[in-house]
Image (cartoon, rainbow, N blue to C red):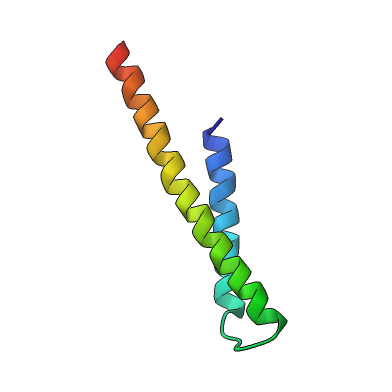
Amino acid sequence: MVTRKSLFLVTAVALVLFATAGIIGNHEHGALYVIANVAWWSFVLCALYLVVASATILLRRRSRLTRS
């Protein structure tokens, strides 16, 4: 179930991942490079989930309004 609380939690995680990728993303090799790449792609997945979940919530709310 997608709720506001879960969306806020995913948003916070996405912001932390974005900051992590941005802070250590300038390395060209090594463990920090791997961590930055994992953080970046995890951020991308979180952002994609946020878009899909937000659209789902909007469509669900719109269908409830038209049924009433």
Q: Is residue 45 above or below residue 67?
A: below
Picture quarter with the C terminus: top left
- Residue in the image at 61% along x and 86% along y: 27
Direction top: furthest residue? 68
Q: Residue furthest right?
A: 31
**Whole-percent x, y for residue 1 in the image:** 56, 30
Q: Quadrant of residue 19?
A: bottom right
Q: Is residue 62 visible?
A: yes
Q: Is residue 20 visible?
A: no
Q: Is residue 54 above or below residue 15?
A: above
Q: Residue at x 32, y 25 (%)?
A: 62
Q: Decide which of 3, 55 is in the foreground and name it.
A: 55
Q: How many marks?
A: 0
Q: Position of residue 60 (x, y in %)?
A: 39, 26
Residue at image location 66% in from the left, 76% down from the top: 34
Q: Position of residue 49 (x, y in %)?
A: 49, 48
Residue furthest to the bottom in view is 28
Residue located 59% across and 63% down the image: 17
When the figure is inspected, residue 3 is found, relative to residue 21, above or below; the finding is: above
Left or right: 61 in relation to 15: left
Judge by depth and name the residue closer to the eye, 30 or 2: 30
Pick out the residue farthest to the left. 66
